[in-house]
């Protein structure tokens, strides 16, 4: 079965009672037993539920994986991956990682006796050099947030394999439509299904996908024990969102390319970060590793941090809000939103100047998007180099 057909057909038979085409919502905490000698396959919704099972089958199929476990949020999924670590273990973490993952590594892992080293995952030798005898896992992601740099997934997965450690890749920004890290040798794929997988900004969720039966068994036990599971309705909504993943992603990519090209030609824009631009440092790797360049664009306003805020607040079609991956276009100001918990020094060291804006380009008419950017840029004062 090909990619676009999978979310529409995998795990979805006509329901036997009324032959409903869409799977009914099993909004039930518990399921009856026929007898004490016959344990039902699904007996209690913290452990499993038919809507959740269907969602897991679809996400596994889209990632070309054998197994999937879904969670109540992307962070709960990341905690699931970290539950494979124990006291005395060491984690290698990409320095360009989602802020929530960074927060777990900084605040929680030390309490549990797990050490962590941050390295640039763009340098596979640096990743290998960071591995110690007690290293158990490397976690990385790409395109990265907010600078949309790429990491050679196959190279890092190979380093992990050679050193006998687990590789965990957060594929949220690309979605399975654009890249399948398991095919490149990664052990565990993470998703915040809140983003492109759900696609409509109406549900928070997460997923882990793997080909390993052992890892899957541990994830199932972990999720059952901790109980950070999504509700049946959240799973139902996510399945509905997933059915249009292919068409949405095509439009996200097309619109984002047009927006990036428009911004690159604008005199009030100092720099555009989009893997689909020839000027992007990882353009060749993106062409090799991805099937499209994604819906995320970031750029630096030619001016001050204040100018970037004026621009962000001046947009009308792009909504000023956290998150990404929904059908609607969102605008984010990383210093006050996704990266607000870092100091300015930490942000600048990660390539996040006060002039940086992040766009999640939606699937609206692209002319409306470009007109919106145009009118918001018109509100930004023209600065001479000395005034910046
Ligand atoms: C790359 C990435 N991973 C994980 C998460 C966490 O996901 P959630 O908000 O669903 O917990 C996010 C959220 O923005 C993200 O951008």
Image (tube, grey):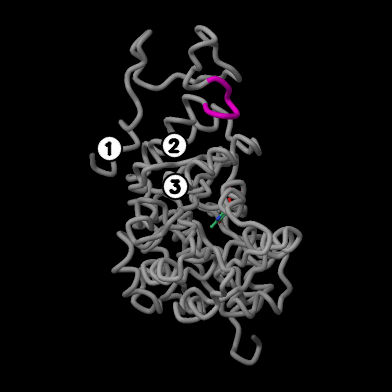
Q: Secondary structure at mark 1?
A: loop
Q: Earlier in the sequence, mark 1 or mark 2?
A: 1
Quadrant of residue 318 within the rendered picture:
bottom right
Residue visible at 64% across and 35% down in the picture:
227
Residue visible at 50% across and 22% down in the picture:
42
Spatial distance from mark 1 to mark 2, Cα to Cα?
Answer: 16 Å
Question: In this rendering, which labeled residue sits more in front, label 1 or label 2?
Answer: 2
Left or right: 347 as drawn, with respect to 267: right
Name above or below for residue 252 compared with residue 226. below
Question: In this rendering, which labeled residue sits more in front, label 1 or label 3?
Answer: 3
- Residue occupied by mark 1: 5
Quadrant of residue 16 within the rendered picture:
top left
Q: Residue furthest left?
A: 1
Q: Residue furthest right?
A: 111
Residue 280, how many percent across, how many down? 40, 76
Quadrant of residue 27 within the rendered picture:
top right
- Residue occupied by mark 2: 56
Contact flag, marks 2 and 3 (Cβ < 8 Å): no
Magenta part, dominant SS: loop
Residue visible at 58% across and 53% down in the picture:
84
């Amino acid at each position: 079965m090909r990619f676009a057909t999978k979310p529409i057909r995998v795990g979805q038979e006509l329901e036997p009672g009324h032959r409903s085409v869409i799977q009914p919502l099993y909004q039930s905490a518990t399921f009856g037993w026929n007898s004490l000698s016959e344990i039902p396959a699904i007996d209690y919704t913290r452990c499993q539920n038919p809507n959740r099972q269907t969602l897991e089958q679809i996400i596994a199929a889209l990632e070309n994986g054998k197994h999937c476990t879904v969670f109540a949020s992307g962070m709960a999924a990341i905690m699931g991956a970290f539950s494979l670590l124990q006291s005395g273990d060491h984690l290698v973490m990409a320095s360009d990682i989602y802020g929530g993952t960074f927060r777990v590594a900084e605040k929680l892992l030390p309490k549990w006796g797990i050490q962590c080293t941050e390295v640039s995952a763009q340098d596979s030798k640096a990743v290998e050099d960071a591995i110690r005898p007690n290293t158990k896992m490397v976690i990385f992601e790409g395109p990265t947030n907010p600078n949309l740099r790429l990491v050679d997934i196959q190279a890092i997965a190979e380093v992990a394999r050679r050193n006998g450690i687990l590789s965990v890749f957060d594929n949220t920004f690309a979605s399975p439509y654009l890249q399948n890290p398991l095919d490149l040798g990664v052990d565990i794929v993470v998703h915040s299904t809140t983003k492109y997988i759900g696609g409509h900004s109406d549900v928070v969720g997460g997923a882990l996908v793997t080909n390993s039966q052992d890892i899957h068994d541990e994830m199932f036990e972990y999720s059952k024990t901790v109980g950070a599971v999504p509700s049946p309705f959240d799973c139902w909504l996510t399945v509905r969102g997933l059915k249009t993943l292919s068409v949405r992603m095509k439009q996200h990519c097309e619109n984002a390319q047009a927006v990036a090209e428009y911004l690159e030609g604008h005199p009030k824009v100092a720099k555009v970060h989009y893997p689909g631009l020839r000027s992007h440092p990882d353009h060749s790797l993106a062409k090799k590793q991805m099937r499209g360049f994604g819906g995320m664009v970031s750029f630096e306003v030619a001016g001050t941090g204040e100018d970037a805020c004026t621009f962000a607040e001046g947009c009308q079609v792009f909504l000023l809000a956290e998150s990404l991956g929904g059908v609607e276009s969102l605008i984010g100001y990383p210093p006050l939103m996704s990266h607000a918990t870092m100091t300015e020094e930490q942000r600048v060291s990660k390539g996040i100047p006060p002039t940086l804006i992040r766009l999640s380009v939606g699937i609206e008419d692209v002319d409306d998007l470009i007109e919106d950017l145009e009118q918001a840029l018109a509100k930004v004062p023209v600065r001479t180099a000395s005034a910046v």
